[in-house]
């Protein structure tokens, strides 16, 4: 009898198949078409070839600058090239989200129970470090194409030829699973800035590297302190303090 129960249990478990599409698994079963109007994810994305995940917020100045460029790009190419944008909000209230989303012609993850978990999981999986970020995915499989959409759309702004070439480059690029994705990669090539930033984050997570760099600097670059050098340091430090602006961006 025990064996029979085990067999039945295994059979039933095998029969429970997750029939959700790749995008349903990523962004949930419903998406907002407009404020207050939800549509089934599988239905509204069924004919799409690519999905652009737009991480943004109304309080973010760079987002306010980029959104009009993305809206123009969307209106020119989205229908013809069969891609869709999904807004993933970092707004701090439903009211702020609604006011911002009303200006957008695309979809959004709803503001409802469970949506925060979906957004957090996406941000962690795609290693989102800042906003605005535009991640391009293959619609049918949910595989990764690029996370450099923002810079690419900005570079193509105002040029139909460049816009067409950009969309084609996305479609031609091999989509990969997230575990194979290189999130410092831009259009198939690592950028110097991406590599530098990855190294900086690694150093910041390991304070011993900072102490080692300071030791190296003081021992081999700066050299041993002398009375003259100490006196000079006092003047330089004072000048630095006088010029220091606490509101300056670094």
Image (spheres, rainbow, N blue to C red):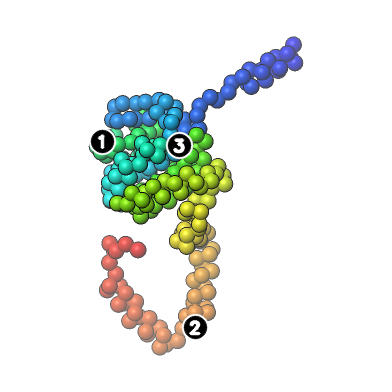
Q: SS at mark 3?
A: loop
Q: Residues within 10 Å of mark 3 (few under 14, many from 20)?
A: some
Q: Earlier in the sequence, mark 2 or mark 3?
A: 3
Q: What's the residue at 40%, 39% (across, down)?
A: 81
On the image, the x and y values in percent for residue 169 come to 46, 49
In the picture shown, does residue 77 fall above or below 206?
above
Q: SS at mark 1?
A: loop
Q: What's the residue at 27%, 72% (across, down)?
A: 243
Q: Residues within 10 Å of mark 2 (few under 14, many from 20)?
A: few
Residue 102 - label: 1
Residue 224 - label: 2
Question: Between tags 1 and 2, which lies in front?
Answer: 1
Q: Earlier in the sequence, mark 1 or mark 2?
A: 1
Left or right, residue 75 beside residue 174: left
Question: Between tags 2 and 3, which lies in front?
Answer: 3
On the image, the x and y values in percent for residue 77 come to 35, 41
């Amino acid at each position: 009898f025990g064996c029979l129960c085990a067999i039945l249990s295994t059979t039933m478990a095998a029969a429970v198949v997750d029939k959700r599409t790749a995008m349903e698994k990523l962004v949930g079963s419903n998406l907002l078409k407009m404020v207050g109007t939800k549509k089934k994810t599988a239905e509204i994305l069924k004919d799409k070839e690519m999905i652009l995940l737009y991480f943004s917020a109304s309080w973010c100045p760079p987002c306010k600058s980029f959104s009009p460029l993305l809206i123009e790009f969307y209106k020119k190419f989205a229908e013809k090239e069969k891609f869709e944008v999904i807004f993933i909000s970092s707004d701090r209230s439903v009211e702020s989200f609604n006011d911002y989303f009303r200006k957008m012609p695309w979809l959004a993850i709803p503001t409802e129970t469970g949506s925060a978990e979906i957004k957090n999981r996406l941000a962690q999986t795609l290693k989102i470090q800042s906003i605005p970020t535009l991640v391009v995915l293959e619609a049918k499989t949910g595989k990764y194409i690029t996370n450099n959409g923002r810079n690419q759309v900005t570079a193509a702004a105002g040029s139909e030829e460049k816009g067409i070439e950009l969309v084609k480059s996305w479609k031609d690029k091999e989509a990969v699973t997230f575990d194979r994705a290189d999130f410092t990669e831009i259009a198939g090539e690592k950028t110097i800035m991406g590599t530098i930033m990855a190294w900086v984050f690694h150093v910041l997570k390991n304070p011993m590297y900072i102490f080692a760099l300071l030791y190296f600097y003081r021992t081999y670059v700066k050299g041993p302190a002398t009375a003259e050098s100490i006196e000079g340091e006092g003047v330089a430090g004072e000048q630095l303090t006088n010029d220091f602006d606490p509101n300056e961006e670094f």
